[in-house]
Each structure stands twice: as C-alpha cells, then as structure tokens.
Amino acid sequence: MPFLDFLVDLSPWWWVAAAFVIGAAEMVTGTAVLIWIALAALVMAVLHALMPGLSGELQITLFAALSVGLTFAGRWAVQRYGDGAASHDTLNQRSNHLIGRTAIVLDFHAASHSGAVTIEGMRWRAEWTAGANAEVGGTVRVRAAEGMILKVEPV
C-alpha cells in the first residue's frame, strides 16, 4: 500500500504526539477505553525508534493489534483489580481511616455513653456501647465511624 509509505520516514515523535492527542481525548471523554489506544501509540513510538525501517503497513497493523490487545488486557486488569472507586473508599472521610485504631479517653459521660477521645493529638467525639464503662486516660478501640462521631469500645 503505497499511501502508507510516508509512515516510514516519519519520526517516532509523531507516535508520541498521537498518544498525547488520544490521551487528551480520553481525559475529555473519561471512557477508560482510549487510554489503552494511547498506550499502544506510545509502544509504537518505542518500536519505531528501535526499528526505524518498519513499513507503513506493518506500523498500522502493529498499532491496531496493540490497541486491541492492550484494550482487552486493560479491561481485564480493571475488572480483576478494580478501578479505585470501591464502595469502601475512605478518601476525604478521615474518621473511617481511624477504624481499628486505639484512642485515649479524654472525657466520658456514663449516662449518655458519650464523650471524647484523642488520636494523634486530634480530639474526636465518641460514643460507647450501652453498658460500657471508661476512665479518663484509659484506652479504647475505634470500631466504627458515623460522620464525625467515633463508635468506640474498651480495650
């Protein structure tokens, strides 16, 4: 195919530029599909730099095969390992990061089973389970968090 012969003489930087354009399109669309095609273009840039005599037909064929292969591999990896948007994501939920940690009791009101604890120098409102008792200066463990209130139990 003589119309693809121009690819032989092009610099590998054109594949890098194509990768950035496709990557920008991925950022606009947010489909998580174009990222694999952009990665295929980057791989083609490396291949073209290592083997500058690749014919235009071979470059397009390799790019298509890499695009399909990386798309399937990427989709499989996202399904297997997740995309980071888990339901238990605790980003911007500092109190959820504290579950399982120990805290020092600053204040305890037996009538309401509530008080305050400190973790890493930060004061938190806390609630104990009914019937639990705590002493100021004692240690408790965070078992859950509801908003900014920690649910604690004696250690």
Image (spheres, rainbow, N blue to C red):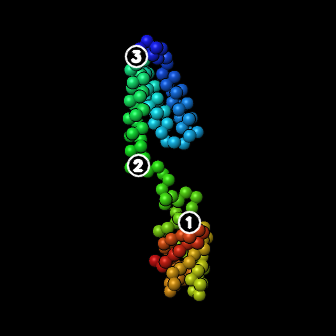
Residue 36 as seen in the image, left or right of residue 30:
left
Q: Residues within 10 Å of mark 2 (few under 14, many from 20)?
A: few
| Label ID, residue 95 | 1
Q: Amino acid at mark 2?
A: Gln
In this figure, which residue is indicated by the disc labeled 2? Answer: 79
| Image depth: mark 1 or mark 2 in front | 2
Q: What is the x, y in percent for residue 143?
A: 48, 72
In this figure, which residue is indicated by the disc labeled 3? Answer: 55
Q: What is the x, y in percent for residue 134?
A: 53, 82
Q: Secondary structure at mark 3?
A: loop
* Farthest top residue in view: 2
Q: Secondary structure at mark 2?
A: helix
Label located before the other in sequence (3 or 1) = 3
Q: Residue 127: which quarter of the image? A: bottom right
Q: Residue at the location (51% across, 75% down)?
A: 152
Q: Nearer the viewer, residue 58 or 133?
A: 58
Residue 93 at least partly seen: yes
Label located before the other in sequence (3 or 2) = 3
Q: Is residue 43 above or below residue 79?
A: above
Q: What is the x, y in percent for residue 86?
A: 48, 56
| Label ID, residue 145 | none
Q: Nearer the viewer, residue 91 or 134?
A: 91
Mark 3–mark 2 contact, CB under 8 Å?
A: no
Q: Is residue 130 above or below residue 72?
A: below
Q: What is the x, y in percent for residue 89?
A: 51, 58
| Image depth: mark 3 or mark 1 in front | 3
Q: Residue 124: which quarter of the image? A: bottom right
Q: Secondary structure at mark 1?
A: helix
Q: Residues within 10 Å of mark 1 (few under 14, many from 20)?
A: some
Mark 3 to mark 2: distance in Å? Answer: 36 Å
Label located before the other in sequence (1 or 2) = 2
Q: Amino acid at mark 1?
A: Ser
